[in-house]
């Protein structure tokens, strides 16, 4: 997984979410859900960037798990928006697909890293 490509994809996904939220209806319910989507959807990229600055393999995996959680939460909000007809389904398909792909890449990375032997710290 190329870190720069993932950074770019997560950033573009965040931009698409921002643009979508701006077009959502302005009702009390949709405002709350839009805020939740905005937070989780934009934090995928922000947290992935934090992964790239991890201080150790363990730190990297822990930060990737946060990215995984945020991507899964984003999918939840997109599904809720779709199932309550707050936004046209056909407009959500590409965003859901991209979020699923990002989630799959992150999960695969976590599994790959966990298969590697973790370095041990010397005992004092």
Image: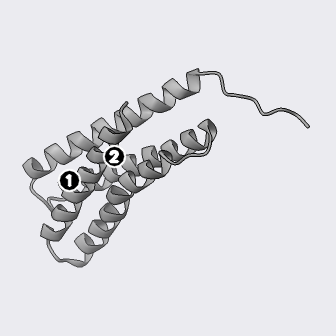
- What residue is shown at x 39% (from left), y 58% (from top)? 43
Q: Residue at 34%, 41% (x, y): give it.
A: 4
Q: Position of residue 110 (x, y in %)?
A: 50, 32
Residue 115 falls in which quadrant of the image? Answer: top right
Seen at 55% across and 41% down, the residue is 60
Give the mark nearest the N terminus, 2 or 1. 2
- Cα–Cα span, label 2 and label 1: 29 Å
Residue 103 position in % (x across, y down): 36, 39
Vertical order, 121 against 99 (above or below): above
Along the viewing direction, whichever of 93 and 81 lies nearer the viewer: 93
Q: Which image quadrant: the N terminus?
A: top left
Question: What mark, if any, has residue 25 been given in the picture?
Answer: none
Seen from the viewer's position, the closer of residues 70 and 58 is 58
SS under mark 1: helix
Q: Nearer the viewer, residue 90 or 12?
A: 12
Question: Residue 34's x, y, as percent?
Answer: 27, 67
Task: Assign the C terminus to one quadrant of the image.
Answer: top right
For image coordinates 16% across by 63% down, the residue present is 19
Secondary structure at numbered mark 2: helix
Q: Which mark is residue 83?
A: 1
Using the image, determine if residue 107 lies above or below residue 39.
above
The number of callouts visible is: 2
Q: Residues within 10 Å of mark 1 (few under 14, many from 20)?
A: few
Categorize mark 2 by other alpha carbons within 10 Å: few (<14), some (14-19), many (20+).
some
Q: Quadrant of residue 113?
A: top right
Q: Which residue is mark 2?
A: 7
């Amino acid at each position: 997984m190329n870190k720069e490509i993932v950074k770019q994809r997560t950033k573009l996904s965040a931009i698409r979410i921002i643009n979508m939220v701006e077009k959502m209806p302005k009702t009390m319910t949709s405002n709350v859900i839009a805020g939740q989507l905005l937070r989780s959807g934009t934090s995928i990229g922000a947290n992935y960037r934090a992964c790239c600055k991890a201080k150790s393999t363990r730190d990297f995996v822990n930060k990737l798990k946060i990215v995984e959680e945020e991507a899964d939460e984003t999918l939840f909000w997109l599904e809720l928006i779709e199932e309550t007809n707050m936004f046209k389904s056909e407009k959500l398909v590409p965003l859901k697909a991209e979020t699923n792909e990002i989630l799959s890449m992150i999960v695969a990375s976590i599994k790959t890293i966990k298969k590697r032997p973790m370095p041990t710290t010397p005992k004092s």
